[in-house]
Image: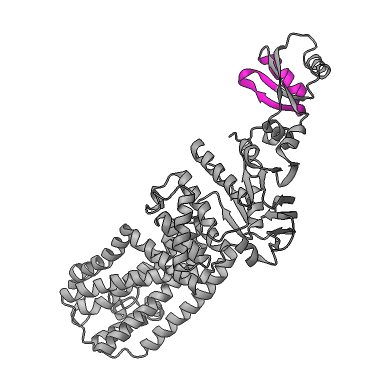
Amino acid sequence: MRDALVMIDRSMRLTRRTVDALLFSLALPVMLMLLFVYLFGGAIDTGTEYVTYVVPGVILLCAGYSAAATAVTVAQDMTSGVVDRFRSMDVGATALLTGHVVASVARNAVSIALVFGVALLIGFRPQAGPLAWLAACGMLLLFVVAVSWLSAAVGLVASSAEAASGFTFFVLFLPYPSSAFVPIATMPGWLHGFAEHQPTTPVIETVRGLLLDTPAGGSAWRALAWCTGLLLVAVALAALLFRRRTA
Amino acid sequence: MTGTAYGVEAAGLAKSYGGRPVLAGVGVRAERGTVFALLGPNGAGKTTTVRILATLTRPDAGQATVAGFDVLRERGRVRRAISLTGQYAAVDALQTGAENLRMTARLAGLSRRDARRRAADLLSRFDLAEAGDRRVATYSGGMRRRLDLAAGLVGQPSVLFLDEPTTGLDPVGRQAMWEVIRELVRGGVTAFLTTQYLEEADQLADRIAVLDRGRVVAEGTPAQLKERVAGQRLDLTLADRAAYEAAAAHLDGRLVRRDPDRLALGVATDGSAAHVRALLDEVDPGRRAVARFAVHAATLDDVFLALTGPATKEPAHA
């Protein structure tokens, strides 16, 4: 427990000091949102104001991308000598990776707040009460934690930080074939199955439903199941991989 | 801690990676409070040996105790008794020296206040007090290595593993590192270091084991090892290239030095007139090939070459 706190302290400090990466992870989601709203938005008809439709999707895209960056920071630790120091001091995988995941959550909190701020400025008008806001933030938090842990596990097996960054692109593209930017009904038939049943769709639908006060059907349960499932698998996998990688 | 006289004791260590044997039965013994050097060329198995002793790698066979604890069955206790300084400084470049040390001290179980004090103490001891609040990214190679070593000392270990502690350092950095290691050993710890520099082993070590292709090919004090090549070396300077090639071919297995640029060869001798004369007659029956000769006391380089054989004729030099 104490080790985990020390590792959190470390990861937070390292994150604050990689200003270039930090600025990028803050600017990218805002730019993507502006891109979707102003460039593509005019051509997309979702039945509502497009900015209102797209904001939950953009938030999820940016959350997933910046959580996936955990793979890179973990891979950096694994390929430098620092992991040997931690291991020879009996610091476990859970403590080390918890540090990375908490730093990822902190990074995300800042960038999500920023996207919401800019979204409100350009006309995003959510209909949510305080409870719904809280639930939406909770949903996003769970998603960020799950993707961060999964990325941490990927970072453990990556042979280099560059290889790990490939994973972030996979996560970056995952929300595209989902209901993030366009309704699934407008996609070709063969894509429906994937788009409806991949993990980001229920999370987006849940956040959208909560913020816009519209019914989200069973999305919330599916989203919770996906996120907790991914989280449990990732934590177990990370512990196993850490032991194997460093045996 | 138990009563054994050895800080490090290992027997029969074996390890293969993908069917390729890296260690083939390595045994070493380092008495408490001494410096033990594992000397060998790149790829000899030095780092693998250290990683096994530091509990980071499991051997395929063999056993070892460090600070009196079994490296397989008492990993936790071994880890609390040792410090490992690897070839790559295990410190965060984006944290300051002081932050790195405080972090390590906290991981070693110190309270926040004690960690702060210990970090300050170590920084001044390793001549890093002024650089303590700078990020490690701005440090020189020697400063990083010293910080790394300092980080390994927060838990007050009784056995230090130093894997090539001065590789890549300039002469000033190397001297500073040697001084730090000597100081620590005077304080009672056991230092187990690996090096490919003969001079380093000669300067620091109480005992040396020469590792070659996964085996210990010789072990003893620096003086004992030097005696193993008869104590003296006969250097021959040949008259021309053809004479050099002929003499080199004739003496092949016995050569301890080859210097084609200077047409010079070195061969072990006991230094007696009879032996030197016999050698000269053997190499140069026509009395034309050898231009001049000289007899020197053997250096560790000679030992190294004589022991590690033809596959490793050109070890890295200090």
Question: Could you say which is closer to the camera, residue B176 or residue A112?
Answer: B176
Vertical position of residue A235 compared to residue B263: above or below:
below
Question: Could you say which is closer to the camera, residue B226 or residue A26?
Answer: B226
Residue A8 among magenta residues: no
Apparent side of residue B214 relative to residue B172 in the rendered image (left or right): right
User: Where is residue B111 drawn, in percent x and y?
Assistant: 48, 69
User: Where is residue A91 drawn, in percent x and y?
Assistant: 54, 67
Residue at position x 74%, y 19% in the image:
B247
Residue at position x 58%, y 50% in the image:
B184
User: Where is residue B2 drawn, in percent x and y?
Assistant: 72, 63
Residue at position x 47%, y 71% in the image:
A4
Vertical position of residue A10 compared to residue B273: above or below:
below
Quarter of the picture containing the N terminus of chain B is bottom right
Q: Main secondary structure of the magenta part?
A: helix
User: Where is residue B191 drawn, in percent x and y?
Assistant: 63, 50
Instruction: Point out the stretch of residues depicted in magenta.
Output: B241-265
Residue B260 among magenta residues: yes
Quarter of the picture containing the C terminus of chain B is top right
Residue at position x 79%, y 24% in the image:
B270
Quarter of the rendering containing residue A183: bottom left
Coloring scheme of the render?
A: one colour
Q: Is residue A88 visible?
A: yes
Apparent side of residue A110 relative to residue A8 in the rendered image (left or right): left
